[in-house]
Amino acid sequence: MTGRIEDRREEWDGPVPVPTGATVPFWAGTLEGELRYQACECGHRQLYPRAVCTACGAEDPPFAESDGVGTIYTYTVCHVPGEPGFADRTPYVVGAIDLAEGPRLLALLDAEPDALEIGAAVGVTFWRVSDKAAIPVFVPK
Ligand SMILES: [Zn+2]
């Protein structure tokens, strides 16, 4: 599945990911609206991307495309910005999202805090924040 991409390059003043090493294919995918995770031949699936499989140690586990849907494992409402660039967007919500394929990732949740609950279904969208990266942001389904 391809997620919607919003171009936020003009207004974004938060942290900008710099693709390096094992994360290059991941960030390349985000520019196409694809959420990629690593699916090792041993069966382990992981995200964020790493140079080795954390289960068996295989190098450069291959990438697979997620459907971009999952559930909220937990979340926190941030009233004090963790990054200077987030100062004017509080309160904002950061969640741990369990993808349907298995991996869990931390991401922004673009929703009113009162509308969220643990276990709720969410889908991925992307905010393009640079020429090289679009950050995954989840919204309630
Ligand atoms: Zn493995």
Image: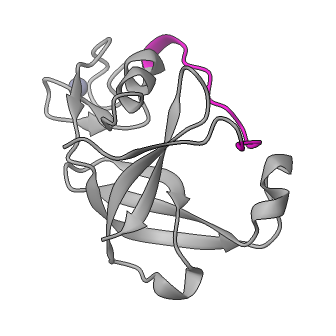
Question: Quarter of the image holding residue 22?
Answer: top left
The prevailing secondary structure element of the residues shown in magenta is loop
Residue depicted at x 20% and y 26%: 40
- The quarter of the rendering in which ligand 1 is drawn is top left
Q: Is the N terminus in the top left, top right, bottom left or bottom right quadrant? A: top left
Can you name the residue that lies furthest to the bottom here? 114
Q: Give above or below for 100 relative to 59.
A: below
User: Where residue 128 sits: x, y (%)?
Assistant: 53, 36
Left or right of 68: which side holds 105?
Answer: right
Residue depicted at x 24% and y 50%: 102
Q: Give above or below for 21 relative to 93.
A: above
Question: Quarter of the image holding residue 35?
Answer: top left
User: Where residue 14 sits: x, y (%)?
Assistant: 74, 43
- Residue in front for this viewpoint, 74 or 128: 128
Q: Give above or below for 140 relative to 25.
A: below
Q: Give above or below for 135 relative to 27.
A: below
User: Where residue 106 sits: x, y (%)?
Assistant: 50, 52
- In the rendered image, residue 95 lying in the magenta stretch gets the answer no
Identify the coloring: one colour
Residue depicted at x 45% and y 25%: 27
